Image: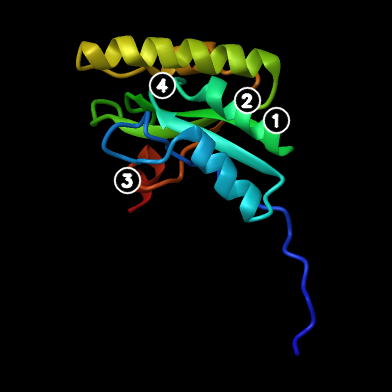
Amino acid sequence: MPEKTTIPPFTHLHTHSMYSVSEALSTPAEICAFAHLAGYASVALTDTNGTFGFMELHKEAKKLGIKPIYGIVLSHDAIVSAGSDRFMMTAISVSKAGLRNICLLATIARNRAEQDAALSWNEVRLHGDGVIFMCGARGSELAEYVA
């Protein structure tokens, strides 16, 4: 019989819930339950342009003894390739200031989406305190720029 191995800590940092319409079906509670069942110490929620599931994520994660990580996938205008299409970027809060900024960016992004627009680079920069931005996923500017 093989020896039992210890899996290093891991957390998916790009996780959508039912609040990312047409992208996922699970509720934040179901995501937390799966993370707990899989033995994760933390769970992230990064819905597109919205923070609607944060309260449920917080409540369920705390109940299960796992750390909630708050994030968002944002639609933004080109940073490097000016004049290009819009791109997606994942933003993760790493502090209380970051959580406030994530919520602010979500509000701005939602308003921009209603106007068929996206966040400007200046808005992202102005509200980036306490936030880690990841821009290497499919649909990101970096992925498009390098490809």
Label 4 vs label 3, nearer the camera: 4
Q: CA distance from mark 2 to mark 1?
A: 5 Å
Q: Give the amino acid at mark 4.
A: Gly
Q: Which residue is mark 3?
A: 144
Q: Give the amino acid at mark 1.
A: Lys
Q: Earlier in the sequence, mark 4 or mark 2?
A: 4
Q: CA distance from mark 3 to mark 2?
A: 37 Å
Q: Which residue is mark 4?
A: 50
Q: Position of residue 13 (x, y in %)?
A: 55, 42
Q: Secondary structure at mark 2?
A: helix
Q: Residues within 10 Å of mark 2 (few under 14, many from 20)?
A: some
Q: Quadrant of the N terminus?
A: bottom right
Label 1 vs label 3, nearer the camera: 1
Q: Is residue 131 left or right of residue 41?
A: left
Name which quarter of the figure residue 64 lies in. Answer: top right
Q: Residue at image x 78%, y 76%?
A: 4
